[in-house]
Image: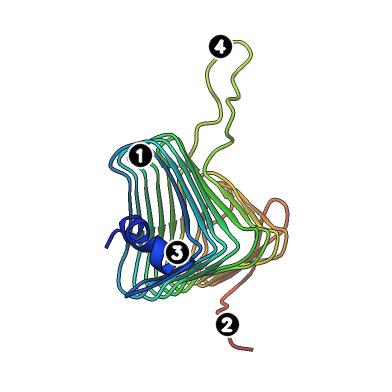
Amino acid sequence: MDLKAIYQKYKKVLQPALYCKNRILGLRIHNKGKNNTVQGIGQCRIKKSRISVNGDNNKIIINDMSSLFEVNVSIVGSNNTILIGERNYLEGCSFCVEDDHNTITLGSHVYIYSDTEISAIESTEVSIGNDCLFSANIMIRTGDSHVIMDETSGKRLNYSESICFADKVWLGNGCKVLKGSKIGAECVVGTGALVTHKTPVVNHSVLAGVPAKVVSTGIKWSQQR
């Protein structure tokens, strides 16, 4: 079901709220391009959110029972995909995609909170597994946005790289996860940590520090207190 088509058809009658299988309250869509789609599957819920697309053949898919509250999505480029799995809760976060052929994928039962930014550029991917919990003020970026070159040869030094989170990763407040990072399953990343491509991938571990290092192993965590 195309959320934009539904909204445009019924907005004069049901604005500001639309109730059907999907629930939309104050969704704003800015579309500049061709063949861009926003697809809601099942009973997804979107409230006070904004989607801006400038390019062609981009897809945003929101799966059953996922809720988006005050979420901003910005895509500048073509052939990009944002896929949000089932039963996710996203509040006050943003997704930023630039250039072509990027992908941001969220598994199921993912919770992401305020002022968290997830960015993919230059044909890279951010992959987030199931049962992940991301606190506030987090920055996740697959690239640096600007080019750094060797002074003598002119060769580029800072290519963008994909980022991967395994299942059940908990990011503390103020974490930064940079290009090429991989975080293993059942891991906790401490407040203010800086994860890079050099951070060891160790399942069931605690990462902390700048840059992040493994400070504890053999752990597991729960959202319950």
Task: Specify the color scheme.
Answer: rainbow
Work out how far the residue at label 2 is from the one at label 4, CA to CA, in angstroms. Answer: 50 Å
Q: Residue furthest bottom?
A: 225
Mark 4 or mark 3, which is nearer the start of the sequence?
4
Q: Amino acid at mark 4?
A: Ser
In this rendering, the answer to whether 155 lies above or below 71 is above
Considering depth in this image, is 81 or 34 the residue closer to the camera?
34
Mark 2 or mark 3, which is nearer the start of the sequence?
3
> From the viewer's perspective, is 221 left or right of 37?
right
Q: Position of residue 28 (x, y in %)?
A: 48, 54
Considering depth in this image, is 17 or 35 the residue closer to the camera?
17
Pointer 2: residues within 10 angstroms few (<14), some, or many (20+)?
Answer: few
Residue occupied by mark 1: 101
Which mark is nearer the camera, 3 or 4? 3
Q: Position of residue 131 (x, y in %)?
A: 46, 74
Work out how far the residue at label 1 is from the one at label 3, CA to CA, in angstroms. Answer: 22 Å
Work out how far the residue at label 3 is from the one at label 4, CA to CA, in angstroms. Answer: 38 Å
Asked whether the beta carbons under mark 3 and mark 4 sit within 8 Å of each other, the answer is no
Mark 1 or mark 4, which is nearer the start of the sequence?
1
Residue occupied by mark 2: 223
Asked whether the beta carbons under mark 3 and mark 2 sit within 8 Å of each other, the answer is no
Residue occupied by mark 4: 153
Residue occupied by mark 3: 166
Q: Position of residue 46 (x, y in %)?
A: 46, 67
User: Tag 2's secondary structure?
Assistant: loop
Q: Residue furthest top?
A: 152
User: Tag 1's secondary structure?
Assistant: loop
Work out how far the residue at label 2 is from the one at label 1, CA to CA, in angstroms. Answer: 34 Å
Q: Residue at x 68, y 59 (%)?
A: 137
Q: Position of residue 216 (x, y in %)?
A: 64, 70
